[in-house]
Amino acid sequence: MNNLIHYMNLHPEPFHKIKYKQKDIELRLLDEKRQMIQVGDFIKFTNTENSECKLSAVVVALHKFPSFDKLYESLSLLRCGYTIDNINQASSADMDVYYPKEKQQEYGVVGIEIRVL
């Protein structure tokens, strides 16, 4: 089995949360590009504000759902980047800014569980 390398850009906040192990599930639309990801594949993340900042991770699990509403009901949001201080404000509507409901219905969503290398 050949493990693929996928490339993803991240804003500085989620980039640093992954880097410092405060987040180990990255949330994405399950579009054609993300449907290719499999357990065991590698992801190379690049910080959108400093392309010299990169980190590598391996995919350890894929959590697929029909919408972010269902994902937010099922996964530990602390593992998705929320903190004890802001967990009460966590809302799946936060993801609608990036991925409209129509796209969620069309493709579904995925929580990509990773381990930083």
Image: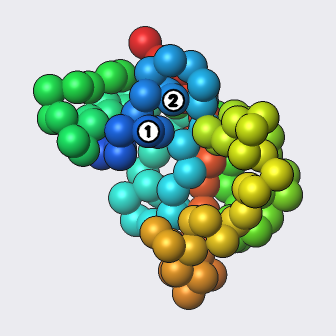
Element carrying mark 2: helix
Q: Which quarter of the figure is the N terminus placed in?
A: top left
At label 2, counting other C-alpha atoms closer than 10 Å, the crowd grade (few under 14, some 14-19, many 20 or more) is some
- The front one of 55 and 112 is 55
Categorize mark 1 by other alpha carbons within 10 Å: few (<14), some (14-19), many (20+). Answer: few
Q: Residue 83 placed where, x, y %?
A: 70, 36
Q: Quadrant of residue 53?
A: top left
Amino acid type, label 1: Glu
Residue 109 seen in this snapshot: yes
Q: Residue at x 61, y 65 (%)?
A: 94
Could you tell me which quadrant the C terminus lies in?
top left
Asked whether residue 58 appears in the rendered view, the answer is no
Label 2–label 1 contact, CB within 8 A: yes
Q: Which residue is mark 2?
A: 17
Rounded to the nearest whole Å, what is the CA distance between mark 2 and mark 1?
6 Å
Rendered location of residue 100, percent (x, y):
52, 80
Residue at image position (57%, 65%) is 95
The residue singled out by tag 1 in the image is: 13
